[in-house]
Image: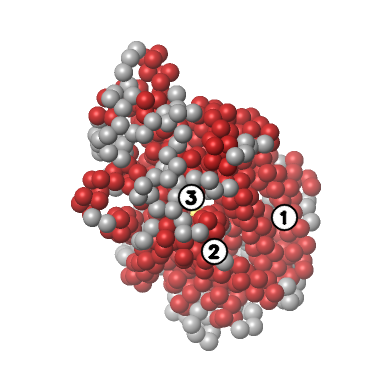
Amino acid sequence: MAEKEEAGRPTWSRQVEFTLAGIGCAVGLGNIWRFPYLCYRSGGGAFLVPYLLMLVVLGIPLLHMELTLGQYLRRGPVMALTKACPLLKGVGMATVAISFIMCTYYNVIITWALYYMFSSFRSELLWENCNNTWNTANCTDRVTNSSSSSTASQQFFNYKVLERTSGVEETGTLRWELFLLLLLAWILVYLCIFKGVKSTGKVVYFTALFPYVILLALLINNVQLPGAIDGIRFFIIPEWDKLLNVEVWINAAAQIFNSIGIGFGSLMAMASYNSYNNNILKDTLAISITNSVTSIFAGFVIFSAFGYMSHLQNVPVSEIAVDGPGLVFVVYPQAFATMPVAPLWAFLFFFMLLCLGLDSQFAMVEVMVTSLLDSYSKPILKYLKRKEFLVLVVCGSAFLLGIPNVMQVGIYVFQLMDHYTAIVSIMFLAFFEVVAVCWLYGVKRLSSNLLEMTGKRPNIFFRVCWWVICPALITVILVFSVIQFKPARYEDYVYPPWAQGVGWLIALASIIWIPLAAVHTLWLLPGSFTERLKKSITPFSLDEDSESPYYKQKGAVMEVIPNIAVISSIVPLSDKPPIQTNL
């Protein structure tokens, strides 16, 4: 039996706080820009069909799997995967690595949101017209697809906010305004989470719920604008021929995957603070369904604005220029400029982005903190004395590593890191996590864990998804991701080969832990190679052999990657043998 109530491990004050924190983690900036963008690119309503199907057969079952493992083992992803499948313990390390890498640049989006939010405190928005010092001769105050001109909002983002250089080869100088806002963003993150789940649980009541108030207000305003109905019609009426395109199905699966956060370890870490007998299925459905409903709700908000812009420009909705994050910081601000009481709507929108971004940022930092405490609790508390100081060290390290993103070259650094982290790495992690949990840990054992905690086994739908459907779908997505892989680029700028090489190093910074940890486990376990291999794929086998060299080895694999190497802990919470786990 797993350890039901571990002494000293905090739990959520109320279970609803975990549900809200999980919703806040899953619902993020991607719901506001990535979902509408993929929907727009995939023919509007046609995207909703594969999206909802992937939610049912991929998103909900895998989230249920992660929450079950985290709650039962009461550990973050590193120690949970070490117990579940010692051979693939590197998957847990990799999830922590990818979360830490992402939190170094994800906070830059919050920084931009803060810049726009503070810029909204004026009677006339700075991106309303071309009468500013940073505007060029080819500036236009109307939305345009012309390659020879750029809009006022594009020039505000590129030449005022970013002051971007011509490419990654030209670093430029530090943007002190963005630097200070990045520092402010990290101070906000720290103040919200430094007390652990007790403080995070209180903050999420606001950060998880308030964005819906703003979205509703924006929707009520947008649907009254001329042309809004045309945008909504484009959103809900499918172009059925688009369903014949394989890429639409791949994008739908990838969006479910990235949006819910499968493979990032965030929700598994937060579930480890649940009460042992918590109803996991209820949380699974609440988090995953709320996430998708929010995406669709945001779709109505964004596409009603698209309809309004198409009316202003007198072109079909399908011809409006939209590309990735530019939807949030270029296209939508341009729509605000012509709305009544524009500064108010701009402030509300960017404050909403701040709330959405902070929720996701909490979760990524919590993964790192939880994993370090799971693995190095005694030495960390010996030197730092309190958990609050550990959180400060993690936030401070991520802040320093994020500084290149607020230089004039920052947008190119940001795009490079996002491309090779969120697109390349995550699919490999997901594949190995499913192999480790669904096949090697086993569906039968996972079902027994649920029975022990909740008194009910998962139904046949979940068991079939875990055993067959999820592994098959993720394999297909992984294969197509490799086949259709395209090098990173930003607008028309193509990165030089050396920058692409740096991108692959960023991807390897997380993926490399999987083979390294596998070799490490096989090297340290006793017996012949066959015996080692058999023991390495047997759950809890390391608990049963606490006298093996594995548990006497401390600090292995610690010098490979500076700043994130600390996540490679393989040491138990103390020098005493771990608690026996009998199934």
Q: Position of residue 54 (x, y in %)?
A: 66, 43
Q: Is residue 463 above or below residue 190?
A: above
Answer with left or right where residue 80 lies relative to residue 320.
Answer: left
Residue beneath disc 3: 274
Q: Secondary structure at mark 2?
A: loop
CA gap, disc 2 and disc 3: 19 Å
CA gap, disc 1 and disc 3: 39 Å
Q: Secondary structure at mark 1?
A: loop
Residue at left 37%, top 25%? Answer: 544
Answer with left or right where residue 559 lies relative to residue 96.
Answer: left
Q: Position of residue 539 (x, y in %)?
A: 45, 27
Q: Identity of the amino acid at label 2?
A: Ala
Query: Is label 2 in contact with label 3 (beta carbons under 8 Å)?
Result: no
Q: Is residue 243 visible?
A: yes
Q: Nearer the viewer, mark 1 or mark 3?
A: 3
Residue at left 33%, top 14%? Answer: 527
Q: Earlier in the sequence, mark 1 or mark 3?
A: 1
Q: Is residue 129 visible?
A: no
Q: Secondary structure at mark 3?
A: loop
Residue closest to the eye, 14 or 312: 14
Q: Is residue 202 above or below residue 249?
A: below
Circle 2 packing at 10 Å, graded few (<14), some (14-19), many (20+), is many
Residue beneath disc 1: 44
Answer with left or right where residue 259 lies relative to residue 112.
Answer: right
Q: Identity of the amino acid at label 1?
A: Gly
Residue closest to the eye, 227 or 69: 69
Residue at left 29%, top 43%? Answer: 376
Q: Earlier in the sequence, mark 2 or mark 3?
A: 2
Residue beneath disc 2: 208
